[in-house]
Image (tube, rainbow, N blue to C red):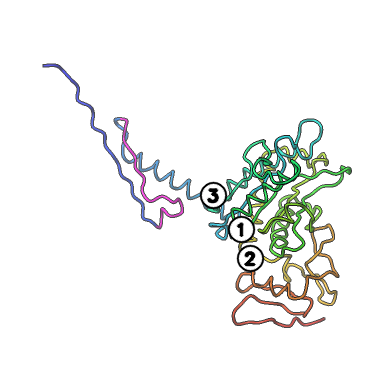
């Protein structure tokens, strides 16, 4: 009779978690095999709990970064890193190019949105242009731009963020600027939400929020902004843009701005934040002074503030200088007069 060793039996440990505990990690059941003799089930349980805790902490970190991140769930967001391929965008003639910087920022933003359970669509994931997607336009550059717009419109996205880096003949120019279509109220609100977060992250007011007559803004059918995150021509800002941690910081600011937008935040600082505001000055939230603060004297078209109020969260308000009222977004409280001083 041959002496044949029988295969050692393997124990299987089934670890189940209550659904409420497992929900943050999107995990209902974790299976673990004891494949090495002597490994105790208790160790496997500890490993499983560690994995669960790590996943939960990762999800919690998203809400620490943006407490209103729940508003992003299920939102289709197009993340568009500008340029690519033979088009480097802004560059310093020493090998530093806009297309590489914005691609890295877009990747970080894409990851954050995915973790927040949004549906991000990134127009390019590598160093290539997009003109082959939409051949109907006359020039290579316009075909590339048309392809990006086509992706947003065809996917019926909820928002589109085009990421760029600026350049100026003046080395002193610095800071972020955000462009929106002059005809899009939602695009303007998105621009304000993102610009505010960028100003907080970069400690620079930059060029503020501005209407822009650009191909993408003119042709996009979804709320769209073009974000210039900084100046490659500014020596200090260039060094920051070449730092991975700084690019991640910019991506986080864009993420928080998007969360603010979908949570229904206003187009400009609220009345409480703007303590120096005087109703008699006839201010509005339609233009800027280049400092990131709304300028005085310009107004939205009649009825625009009432339309904007429909997009605010219940209980919040927006000031309408045309009627000198605060328009509240509630079912039972209408416009309330604001006492003149």
Q: CA distance from mark 3 to mark 1?
A: 17 Å
Residue at the extreme right of the image, as rendered: 170
Q: Is 144 situated left or right of 37 in this image?
A: right
Residue at the extreme left of the image, as rendered: 1
Q: Secondary structure at mark 2?
A: loop
Residue labelled with disc 3? 115
Along the line of sight, which residue is nearer the eye, 125 or 317? 125
Residue 69: say if magenta.
no
Packing grade of label 3 (10 A; few <14, some 14-19, many >=20) is some
Q: Secondary structure at mark 1?
A: loop
Q: Secondary structure at mark 3?
A: helix
Asked if the residue under mark 2 is in contact with the one under mark 3, i.e. CB atoms within 8 Å, the reply is no
Percent x, y of residue 263? 61, 63
Residue 22: say if magenta.
yes
Q: Earlier in the sequence, mark 3 or mark 1?
A: 3
Asked if the residue under mark 2 is in contact with the one under mark 1, i.e. CB atoms within 8 Å, the reply is no
Residue at the extreme top of the image, as rendered: 2
* x 72%, y 46%: residue: 137
Q: Earlier in the sequence, mark 1 or mark 2?
A: 1
Asked if the residue under mark 1 is in contact with the one under mark 3, i.e. CB atoms within 8 Å, the reply is no
Task: Say which mark, if any, is on residue 264.
Answer: 2
Region rendered in magenta: 20-36
Q: CA distance from mark 3 to mark 2?
A: 21 Å
**Residue 9 quadrant:** top left
**Residue 144 quadrant:** top right
Please say if 143 is above or below 154: above
Residue labelled with disc 1? 158
């Amino acid at each position: 009779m041959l002496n044949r060793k029988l295969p050692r039996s393997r124990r299987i440990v089934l670890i189940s978690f209550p659904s409420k505990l497992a929900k943050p990690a999107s995990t209902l059941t974790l299976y673990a095999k004891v494949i090495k003799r002597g490994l105790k089930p208790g160790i496997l349980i500890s490993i499983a709990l560690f994995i669960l805790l790590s996943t939960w902490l990762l999800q919690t970190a998203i809400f620490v970064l943006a407490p209103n991140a729940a508003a992003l769930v299920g939102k289709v967001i197009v993340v568009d890193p500008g340029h690519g391929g033979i088009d480097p965008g802004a560059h310093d003639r020493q090998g530093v190019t806009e297309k590489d910087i914005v691609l890295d920022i877009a990747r970080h933003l894409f990851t954050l949105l995915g973790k927040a359970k949004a549906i991000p669509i990134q127009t390019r994931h590598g160093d290539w242009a997009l003109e082959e997607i939409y051949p109907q336009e006359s020039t290579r550059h316009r075909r590339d731009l048309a392809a990006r717009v086509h992706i947003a419109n065809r996917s019926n996205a909820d928002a589109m963020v085009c990421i760029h880096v600026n350049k100026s003949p003046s080395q002193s120019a610095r800071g972020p600027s955000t462009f929106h279509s002059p005809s899009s109220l939602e695009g303007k609100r998105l621009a304000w939400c993102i610009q505010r977060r960028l100003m907080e992250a970069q400690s620079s007011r930059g060029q503020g929020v501005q209407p822009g007559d650009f191909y993408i803004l003119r042709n996009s059918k979804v709320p769209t902004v073009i974000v210039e995150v900084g100046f490659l021509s500014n020596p200090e800002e260039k060094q920051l843009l070449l730092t991975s941690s700084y690019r991640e910081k910019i991506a986080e600011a864009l993420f928080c701005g998007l969360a603010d937008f979908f949570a229904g935040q206003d187009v400009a600082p609220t009345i409480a934040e703007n303590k120096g505001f005087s109703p008699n000055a006839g201010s509005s939230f339609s233009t800027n002074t280049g400092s990131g603060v709304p300028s005085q004297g310009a107004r939205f078209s009649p009825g625009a503030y009432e339309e904007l109020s429909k997009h605010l969260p219940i209980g919040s308000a927006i000031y309408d200088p045309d009627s000198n009222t605060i328009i509240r977004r509630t079912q039972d409280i209408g416009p309330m007069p604001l006492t003149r001083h």
